[in-house]
Image (cartoon, helix red, strand yellow):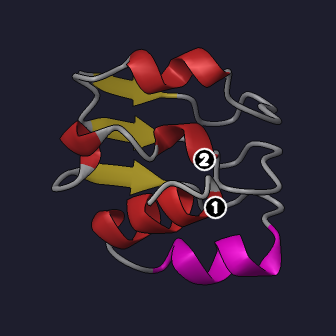
Amino acid sequence: MDLDLRDNEITQFPESFEKLKALQKLDARNNLLKTIPICIWPLESLRNHYLKFDGNPLDSKSKKIIAKEVKDILEFCREQANIK
């Protein structure tokens, strides 16, 4: 499943977003997100696919991580959620 949320002025994702277990591609570019939503960390279906957050006013930690691979972004979100 693909989800294109580009250019929608989104400021956050709902917690229920983590229920999208079949999600393989997420494009959240050009919104108003200040951090990468931690609710995406359980979405293992994204791990080898597509995840974009460019064009958002992200904090410095989030800006650094979005240049990395999807698995690294998901790990960052898991750590931010304090899940071990």
Residue 38, numbered label: 2
Judged from the image, the secondary structure of the residue bearing numbered disc 1 is: helix
Judged from the image, the secondary structure of the residue bearing numbered disc 2 is: helix
Image quadrant occupied by the C terminus: bottom left
> Does residue 39 lie above or below 75 as drawn?
above
| Tags 1 and 2 touching, CB below 8 Å | yes
Q: Distance between the residues labelled 1 and 2?
A: 7 Å
Q: Position of residue 66 (x, y in %)?
A: 53, 71
> Does residue 1 lie above or below 64 as drawn?
above
Is 61 left or right of 70, judged from the image as shown?
Answer: right
Q: Is residue 47 in the magenta section? A: no
The segment highlighted magenta reads 59-67
Tell me the amino acid under the disc marked 2.
Ile
Residue 40, numbered label: none
> Along the line of sight, which residue is nearer the eye, 12 or 80?
80
Residue receiving disc 1:
80
**Numbered label tally:** 2
Q: Earlier in the sequence, mark 1 or mark 2?
A: 2
Tell me the amino acid under the disc marked 1.
Gln
User: Which residue is at 82% across, 71% downward?
Assistant: 59
Image quadrant of residue 68?
bottom left
Q: Is residue 64 in the magenta section? A: yes
Image quadrant of residue 16?
top right
Q: Position of residue 40 (x, y in %)?
A: 48, 41
Is 15 left or right of 24, judged from the image as shown?
Answer: right
Image quadrant occupied by the N terminus: top left
**Neighbours of disc 2 within 10 Å: few (<14), some (14-19), many (20+):** many
> Does residue 35 lie above or below 14 as drawn?
below
